[in-house]
Image: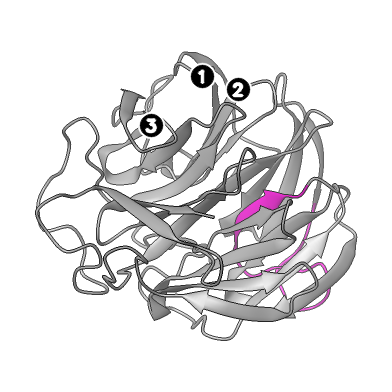
Amino acid sequence: MKQQEKIAAVVIGITVLVLIGAIAIGLKGGKGGGKPGTPAARKLSADGQLNAPRGVAVDSKGFVYVVDSENHRIQKFDAQGKYVSKWGAEGTGDGQFKTPGGIAVAADGFIYVADTWNHRIQKFDANGKFQAKWVGEGGFWGPRDIAVDDQNFAYVTDTGNRRIQKFTVADGKFVKQWGTQGAGPEQYDEPFGINMAKDGLLYICDRLNFRIQVVDADGKLMRSWSVDGWQKEQFYMEPYLAVDDARDIVYVTDPTKHRVQIFNREGKFLGHLDKDPQTQDMFGTPLGVAVSPLDSTVYITDMTANQLYIIKP
């Protein structure tokens, strides 16, 4: 059975050992973490405010792009969290969204968004100008995330169809797909977050198999490891992940446990983060996570606190 639209999202986390500062932007006037598992109590739609944020990505200049999911838009910030611009509104037209999920930025600056409940991918320039869209081979069902590599390919977690699809980034031309429903090697049960490391390997949150799968660009399994803490059918159990290439660290969000888990690339558990290091507020529901390619700063979205945390290395 395919995943229904009412399942919300979960996001990713951050390191606990070498992080020294955090800045929170988004919901002001409340403690950072709030009550874990409690969704936004009121509409937050002003510039710079976030309403159930999900995916987050950082470009080569340090600009940060946040999927402001329940406002059906993308917001752009500078590296310090200062609001820059926004685009998008609820709808089905070009440049409009329906509860978007993940986001990725290519080396050339183009931005790719998993427009989850419009069942498509949309491509934009760095200023939010619409470029292209595609709906996948045989149609997506609730795609949650997208990753791009340095070889001009994009990879989409076609979550409801339990598979990964690969495309050219220029025009969304289908290249191949892999995965079937199951718990065996190279099988998936609702793949969620996906991230491409500089070595050309894809890291995938295999959500309902409670594991990370690491595959090459053609889908061949290289290794996998289990994630202790993920639980089936928990509200907002929608994990994302990010690879810090400079430090060989993988950050995996563990939303229902209100934390971000930290692993090395081989899957060895290194620790977890469950609070804002600056304010000591507990995380609510961390979903999205990204690492700056410039200085390894980590950016985390908190869906129920309506926050973007900035963690300095």
Callout 1, which amino acid? Answer: Ala
Q: Position of residue 42 (x, y in %)?
A: 9, 51
Residue bounds of the magenta highlight: 178-197
Q: Nearer the viewer, mark 2 or mark 3?
A: 3
Residue 226 occupies quadrant = bottom right
Nearer to us in this view, 34 or 20: 20
* Residue plotted at (17% across, 64% down): 31
Q: Amino acid under label 3?
A: Phe
Q: Earlier in the sequence, mark 2 or mark 3?
A: 3
Residue 207 sits inside the magenta stretch: no
Q: Nearer the viewer, residue 10 or 114?
A: 10
Q: Which residue is mark 2?
A: 110
Magenta region includes residue 193: yes
Q: Which mark is first along the chain, 1 or 2?
A: 2
Q: CA distance from mark 2 to mark 3?
A: 16 Å
Residue located at (42% from left, 71% from top): 255
Q: Is residue 141 visible?
A: no
Q: Nearer the viewer, residue 282 or 237?
A: 282
Residue receiving disc 3: 77
- Can you identify the residue that label 1 sits on? 126
Answer left or right for 181 relative to 311: right
Contact between labelled residues 1 and 2, with CB atoms less than 8 Å apart: yes
Residue 74 visible within the image: yes
